[in-house]
Image (cartoon, rainbow, N blue to C red):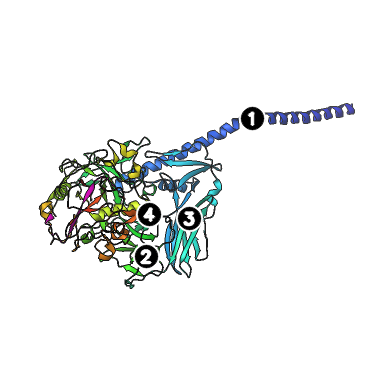
Amino acid sequence: MNMKIKNQRAITLIALVITIIILLILAGISIASLTGSGLFAKAGEAKIKTEIANIEEEANLIYSELLISQYINEIDKPEMSNIVSKLIDRGYKIEEVMALSLDKDAISLSINGTATITVKYNGSPDPINYYVVINEEYYKMTLTENAVKVDRNPSEMDKTVTIETLKAESNNTNVTVESINGSVITLKGGTTAGTSTITVTYGSHTATCEINVVVRPTETSEVVEGTTFSTNHGKIDVIWLKDNTKEVVSNPNTPILTSGGESMTPVKWNDSNNIVPTTNTDTNWYNYEENRWANTRTANESYFVWIPRYAYRITYYENETSTTPTGYYDGYGQWKAEDASIRLKLDEGVDTVDYNGEKYIVHPAFDNNVEMGGWSNKLSGFWFAKFEMSGATATELKSTYGVRSIGDQTIGTQYKNARTATYGYIGTIDSFDNNKSYMNSHMTKKSEWGAVAYLTHSKYGRNSKEITINDNQSFYTGGAPGTAYIQNTNQSTTGNTYGIYDMSGNSFEVMAVFNSVDSNNYFTTNGWTEATELTVESNSTKYATKYYNSTTEQSRNIIVNKTGKIGDATKEVNTGGAYSTTNTSGYRNWFTDNEYLANSEYPFLLCGGYCGYSVESGIFSSNCAVGYAIYYYSLRTVLTP
């Protein structure tokens, strides 16, 4: 009996063990079944999508709050960084992933001196790409014009890029990397002059900067007579200045659209290269880092391009392929790289900015020195006509593409038309000359032409590359009738549709420039005195700049005669050759462009092309000729807020 009970207990225990084993097997099968069918995976995906939807909803609530604050407080439109900072405060994990670039591709550095280069990060529309991190996966966030979007699929990216170390190395001992602090790299020059290359790396991204260690002038340095060096080619470094100050900022000033209660309309180009209107809060309206300058359209469909306030310096080279500087033009004047000998002093009254160990020139077109081509007050920027003007009268005046530009008008007529153009608006009266116009419309001054030329030659434009001539024989703006400008982007100052056209070639453009001597009485015969009330005894105004050339020659040897002005694309880009009737190659600017200035015999100045006259025209003072005859003279206007 006892044996029987023991056997029964043993059987029961064995059954229990077997049952447990079976249950475990069944549980394993069930788990495998669930995971194998993707139920757990699908549940996980659903959870992630729910989290993405939640962060997207919260991000857009933050965005709405910021937009309301923008409207109430009249502040700038919120950017992605503003939204991200609030999301991080609320506990979300968001990473920044960057593509590397540098704020300078070349700088000069004093012997034993220091300077910095700053790492910048590319991306559109924001300079930094943002990713929300969920379960160690990265989901990209983007800010459109209306909402924040989060990708539903994780991004295939090198996640280690966010924890890489920023590195910088010099290719020789003449320049050393002194420190790396965040995105700022400090460099130190050696004891001798020379050229070095700094290579900056961050993850798989690299960028380089050319460093030229030089002997630099001082504030007390004087001109050294007989100083010579090649100025055949040059690169122009531009830094943005905030509002109407000398404070250096990373982004250009916001374009001003409104004057007298009337506003222009921002425009951009879509993927089909069609012009579409937009708003000043559109983050895709413009991006100077990507060579897309701000464009706007007036009530009569004239197009203008915003030229923001900036300072600049020029580095000279022997030719376009050379990497060794021969000299500089900056806040010290024009000086030789080899020994810092000054060839030309900086013009009197020109303002400068000390930045990153360099002395930059505040472009006179934005300042209030009218003698140097400035305005009545310091400017944050101005609007430059995108095309040469069409229209025979002030009410017909228009800057648009694919039409025949103005011709066969005296400088006086064109000056008056420019000063009284309203572009479809009511306009306002300027008590200075009692002319009524929209946004102080006026004939382009040489300083304003120069400001466009120098910005074109910087990294924000064609970056020391010559633009292509508009050689249309019928003087059509943009190179041909209709929308040909879309294909002719090589004629643009930016190499795309966002730039300014007809700067090289097409017709001569009348400049608001006059000379101190008029031996042929052209002030009267060209209607200049009647339109402007200016004579040879008059001083410069905010609308017209006076030059002082008492000779009859056309001042091709600008370095010797010193008749050009800083910033007007004359002596700074002159190759130094002297003019003679037997040495025509001696009166050239960069790209072998012609250079003429007003003189005692021909007291007015024109700029631009005239395609039937020469095909050597380029962006810098190309084919500038004095107004002694009517070939085909066009007009370009400027709007000053």
Q: Is residue 279 magenta?
A: no
Q: Which residue is mark 4?
A: 250
In front here: 47 or 626?
626
The picture quadrant where one finds residue 44 is top right
The picture quadrant where one finds residue 280 is top left
* Earlier residue among tags 2 and 4: 2
Residue at image coords 31%, 37%: 484
Q: Secondary structure at mark 4?
A: loop
Near mark 1 (Cα within 10 A), the count class, few <14, some 14-19 or many ≥20, is few
Q: Secondary structure at mark 1?
A: helix
332 lies above or below 482:
below
Q: Nearer the viewer, mark 4 or mark 1?
A: 4
Q: Which residue is mark 3?
A: 208
CB under 8 Å between discs 1 and 3: no
Mark 1 and mark 2: Cα distance apart in space: 78 Å
Q: Is residue 110 visible?
A: yes
Region of the chain picked out in magenta, as a range: 504-522
CB under 8 Å between discs 3 and 4: no
Mark 3 and mark 4: Cα distance apart in space: 19 Å
Amino acid type at mark 4: Ser
Mark 4 and mark 1: Cα distance apart in space: 54 Å
Q: Nearer the viewer, mark 2 or mark 4?
A: 2
CB under 8 Å between discs 4 and 1: no
Amino acid type at mark 3: Thr
Point out which mark residue 333 bears: none
Going by the image, does 95 lie left or right of 544?
A: right
CB under 8 Å between discs 2 and 4: no
